[in-house]
Amino acid sequence: MADAKAVKVLVSGDVEGNITRLYTRVNKILKTSGQFDLLLCVGDFFGSDDTDWQQYKSGKLKAPVPTLILGPCKPDLSKYFPDSESPELCENITYLGPRGRYTASSGLQITYLSGIEAEGEKGISTFSSQDVADLLLPVVSNSQYKGTDILLTSQWPRGVDKYATEPETDRRTDSPLIAELARVLRPRYHFAGCEKVHYERQPYRNHKTIQETALPVSRFIALANVANKEKRKYMYACNIVPMSKMGWIELIKQPSDATECPYTPTEIKALTKKQDQEESGQQFFYDMSSRGGDQRGRRRQGQHDRGGRGGKMPRKSFEPSGSCWFCLGSPEVEKHLVVSVATEAYMALAKGGLVPDHVLILPIHHHRCTVTSPDDVLQDVDKYKASLKKFFKAQGKSVVFFERNYKTSHLQIQAVPVPQDSIQDIKDTFSQCAEEASFPLDEIPKHSDLKQIVPAGVPYFYAEIPTGERLLHRIQEQFPLQFGREVMAEPQILNMPERVDWKNCKIDKDEESEQAAAFKSSFRDFDFNFQ
């Protein structure tokens, strides 16, 4: 782990619409220090003047580094954030969202919270205690949690300067909720903006000396606004080895100037309520059968059974559910459709499926797409793909897998079984449909890594077909949301054009439950969780 590659990261304070000024500075840094992997922007990226933004939005200018930005801190800037779920605002500039966790292909973990703390009704430029509770729930319910690499907030945490040098601001907009967020998350780096000053606090400990086991220290860094007249520092550069690739001894090294943690515990009622809800609902993840004596029944009691070998299974950590329909910990999930659950991924019957055994492979926690999913998630995804190939082969069928990372916030891999006599036509059918829709669909090398081809934050459509080809389209403009289904429904494959729109294929809940039970029963002998 000592040889793990560091991720080169740039961080900027409030850009306030001075986008060209920002990237002029970035280009100078690139010229002297080489390419960076990410640019993270806290505070308000946009301002009242959109002259610079129009240059980038139109494609006349391009961001030189993949840029991740937070949402607005002022209501009048919400116009820059469309209702579309597509996170890419223009090429290389991606909106992270209101709050959540982002895992880069490098393994770097970034937790983020947009806006400022709401005093009244919550809006696009504010956050509430519920948002903070959603971020903290998977941490407080996971005894294996070690920390996060980076925390991004626009607002400062209240009391951050306790035990430290004083900043050049009275921080009238600091937030007690962010202080509690930072205390529990224990970020290695916490970046914030909004106050138009630069402040780099001494690192602080996240444990009590002698009394508690050592933990990694945290560093809080606030950045000034771009183009400020006082020439205060608004850009920070660092090389960070993801903590997932570091040894624990290296992680917990304590610098000589480390202080005590400045934050005191604060109760968040929304978090307590959410914990109670999760405690009452979490048995579902381990009890997928009414037969109490089967393998999944034993998992519910905390035993992990693979081929008869018993052992303690660690408690799962739940990703913030919010209103996501696909996070397995979310109350929005239609649990009767779930047919298999692994450690990091699960499988569910597609709602309004093209055929009765059309299924989805999804991560249990909140990951947007294949490109940003951690390796342990992708390992379970690959195992499900292999199991489905064997399952459908036994029925004299093949299977097509496709993913649309566009206007969706949670990874969904569609798995559609197709007749064996159709497989030679699938590639040509995909190509013809793409040509008719006027966009390119490229074949990529069979053994290439999608993460190395598509940058994080870029929308794409990706398909794996039975003859071994892998097809990719990087979405730059509009894209037909039902493209994958349209191809599958063509006469050369399934010949069911009337089933392109899933809404026209919905059946009632009882029928869905029957289909799910039938699939689960027939798939069991092929399910790697029972091998």
Image (cartoon, rainbow, N blue to C red):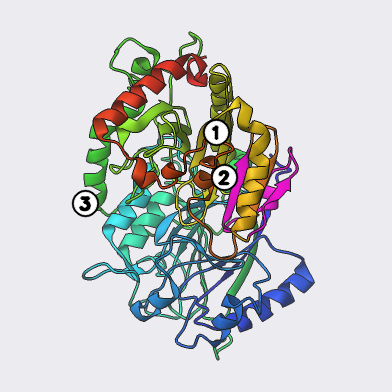
Q: Nearer the viewer, mark 2 or mark 3?
A: 2
Q: Is residue 466 above or below residue 72?
A: above
Report whether 30 appears left or right of 483. Answer: right
Whole-percent x, y for residue 83 in the image: 39, 66
Asked if the stretch drawn in magenta spans residue 513, the answer is: no
Q: Which mark is residue 269?
A: 3
Asked if the stretch drawn in magenta spans residue 443, the answer is: yes
Within the image, what quadrant is residue 235 found in? bottom right
Instruction: From the viewer's side, name the closer residue of 109 and 410.
Output: 410
- Whether label 2 touches label 3, CB < 8 Å: no
Q: Is residue 240 visible?
A: no
The amino acid on which the numbered mark 2 sits, given as a three-letter code, is Thr
Residue bearing mark 2: 370
Please report the residue visible at 39 percent of the width from the left and 16 percent of the height from the top: 521
Q: Nearer the viewer, mark 1 or mark 3?
A: 1
Report whether 115 appears left or right of 440. Answer: left
Query: Residues in magenta?
Result: 439-464
Instruction: From the viewer's side, name the closer residue of 104 and 392.
Output: 392
Whole-percent x, y for residue 430 in the image: 63, 46
Within the image, what quadrant is residue 169 found in? bottom left
- Mark with earlier residue (2, 3): 3
Distance from the alpha carbon under mark 2 to that under mark 3? 34 Å
The amino acid on which the numbered mark 1 sits, given as a three-letter code, is Val
Q: Is residue 387 above or below residue 10?
A: above
- Mark with earlier residue (1, 3): 3
Whole-percent x, y for residue 63 in the image: 64, 72
Q: Which mark is residue 381?
A: 1
